[in-house]
Amino acid sequence: MAIGLILLIAAVDFLTGDKFGAVLEAMSAPRLPALPQISDKDVVRLNRSQNWDEQTTAKFHHISQGTSTLPIPLSWLLALEQPASSLFTIPFGDRGKFSDNSYLLRFGFIEGEKSDLNPDGLPVGFALSQYESLEGINNSETVVGFNCSACHTSQLIYNNKRYIIEGGAAPIDLGQLTIALGAALGQTLVSSKFPIFNARFDRFAKAVLKDDAYTDKNAADLAVELEARVASLAEAPGEVDVVEGFARLDALNRIGNQVFALDPKRYGNYVAINAPVNFPHLWTASWFDWVQYDGSIMQPLIRNAGEAMGVRATINTRAPKGEARFSSSVPLANLYWIEQALSGDNPFPSGSTEGLDNPFVRDPGTGLNGLTGLSGPKWPEAFGEVVPARSSKGEALYTEHCAGCHLPPLNSDAFWRNQDTHETGYGSRKYFEPEVYYNEKPHAGQSLSERGADGRYKHATPDALLNVKMISVEQVGTDPATADIMKYRTVDTAGDAGGTAAEQTAGMGVSADICTYAPQSMDPKIASASEPRLVNVSVGDSPDMLFGLALGAIVQQVNNEWFIENYIAEEDQAIYEEHRPNCLQIDAGYKARPHNGIWATAPFLHNGSIATVYDLLSPPDQRPRYVQLGNITFDPVHMGLKQPEDITSLFRPGEKYSSDGYFILDTTVPGNGNQGHEFSNRWDREKGWDQQAKGVIGPALSKEDRMNIIEFLKTL
């Protein structure tokens, strides 16, 4: 025993050099919650009630998006053991595989089913990509990454039953998973350094190489690859200012870091994680005119390809110009399938909304709605029957205080008649209308004489899109961190022309046309009379470019390269793009989406800082400072995540995780704020909603009013 300790101390001394200092920092295993013990017969899958069959659901869970989120080969993942709790226990005993459900599900993942797409029975959202290259590893390998279902499949527990909700907010903790994977790799590397106490590495090598390939030389070569891979991962920045925890991810900054810092090794573009958001639910979103919490993206393919890039799709950003720079591992055909499964058919097939009385109910005999893709989950009867009298009162309150921003319920005639208009921030619009934009090029069949005075042609999307309302951050008053990313973050994509010719570098090669809103006139009279216009602009390399514009351009270039490499005709490219332009908007505020299925989407607000609808409808001074995330026990009374009675007894001041492994969100931390969206006595009945004090959106609601609104939300 003493000899083992001496050798381990020597290992620590060996690994404290510059190359491995970061490895040691991440050597400890994270503290994780216990896994709820619920049998398979007590799992309730809501996919049928959400308009998906088993085949669609299974494919959505494991179809590849070309990612390597877990940045090691599949063979390594299946061979890797769980990290030991202490550095000094590394040599002693097998602790089970890292890929075992008994371990991975403790990070919030959902157990997957074995299939052709998932032969190893990995959790929902784990997907395989073949023939991928990883730095430090000699051969192309099958790798493991996330597809969108990893972050957008949710689960709730109520009365000892587990409910699986397709397209919902996943309760996963990617930060803890990253720490655990780093610890497991680092500990295996330590084990490889000592011939006597190398049992952990030896078991790893035998599992990776298999019996017929396991030799001393091959094991030694594997150790070299392991060391190189760990060193490569350790050199990349990974600073975190605001811990994400369960159910949250700083998605926009992570995408920006991956695309502009980690992939091209331009580490000056790295931004510490500081703006976590709750994973948004996917149903209905395919038809929004603008998606993301900040309403920054229009085209589904741009959104989905950007998502894949953010979770480690491989992108070539360093090939010489003209040699397939921006080629990638992103399979756009798979992304298109995912979007079609989510969206279903156009609810207005002709592109027009005129003369349709109530397309929401296509067949009165079945009650199917006009959105044929993934629908929001219906309130389960097991959660309690809806009380009609209270729901009716709640409906009146909802119409008065909520529908102005979140629109009438999607299961109402008022919505689907589509005769009313609402203010979207860009003028008065019907709920469903085609989106108008302007381009320098005419579309097919458009006369050259239709060119406007500004030299552009007026276009419109062939599909009518759902015009969601954008509310300024100043008005809604919720935490601004996420909205500030697009508003303030910049990236450097330019080359360096200084020094000798050998020292000069080329830029990233950003070069694409995207569309965005043209600046309004500085003259208030002109600005108030002019309609905001979506116009095409050219984006190129710059040392100080707005992150949103740079990202929109690079994703377009990645998509264009895939079209070229796969011989996709121009008219078919438009199909992949849903006939929508690559339009972006900056600093529009936060999106107010419809509330269908809202009961299943806790935690609330964009950053997940409120556990229940009841707390959300309460005055801000009555909202809890601390929120526990990771415990998925459902509270049907207050509609949200059940919270411990005395949460402060579960952790010491400054700790981010409780004694039982759950994340503790402190709402006083910038980025985690729970203010705004306020129903309070500060409401001025003499003023319109957009003239209220910052953050105030309605009058104070009595406890009975809050409970009545909750009762109505169960019906949506």
Image (spheres, helix red, strand yellow):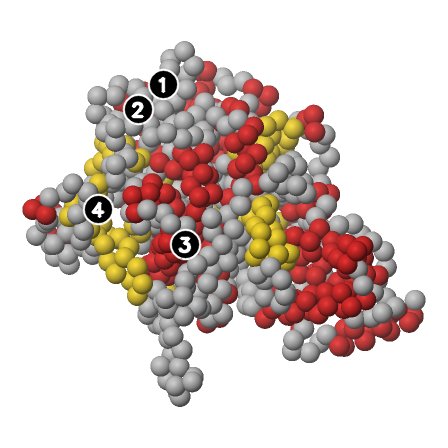
Which residue is found at the position 47% from the left and 48% from the top? 331
Tag 1 near tag 3, CB within 8 Å: no
Tag 2 near tag 1, CB within 8 Å: yes
Question: Which residue is tagged 3?
Answer: 565
Which residue is found at the position 86% from the left and 66% from the top? 197
Split into 4 quadrants, where in the image is the N terminus? bottom right
Q: Is residue 249 above or below residue 15?
A: above
Front one among 128 and 148: 128
- Residue 361 numbered tag: 1
Question: What element does badge 3 sit on?
Answer: helix
Disc 3 residue type?
Glu
Question: Which residue is tagged 2?
Answer: 416
Question: What element does badge 2 sit on?
Answer: helix
Measure the alpha-carbon separation of dots 4 and 1. 31 Å
In the rendering, at what x and y percent does residue 689 appear? Answer: 28, 39
Question: What element does badge 1 sit on?
Answer: loop
In the rendering, at what x and y percent does residue 578 appear? Answer: 33, 40
Mark earlier in primary sequence (4, 1): 1
In the rendering, at what x and y percent does residue 336 appear? Answer: 42, 41
Measure the alpha-carbon separation of dots 3 and 2. 42 Å
Measure the alpha-carbon separation of dots 2 and 1. 9 Å
Question: Which residue is tagged 4?
Answer: 437
Mark in front: 2 vs 4: 4
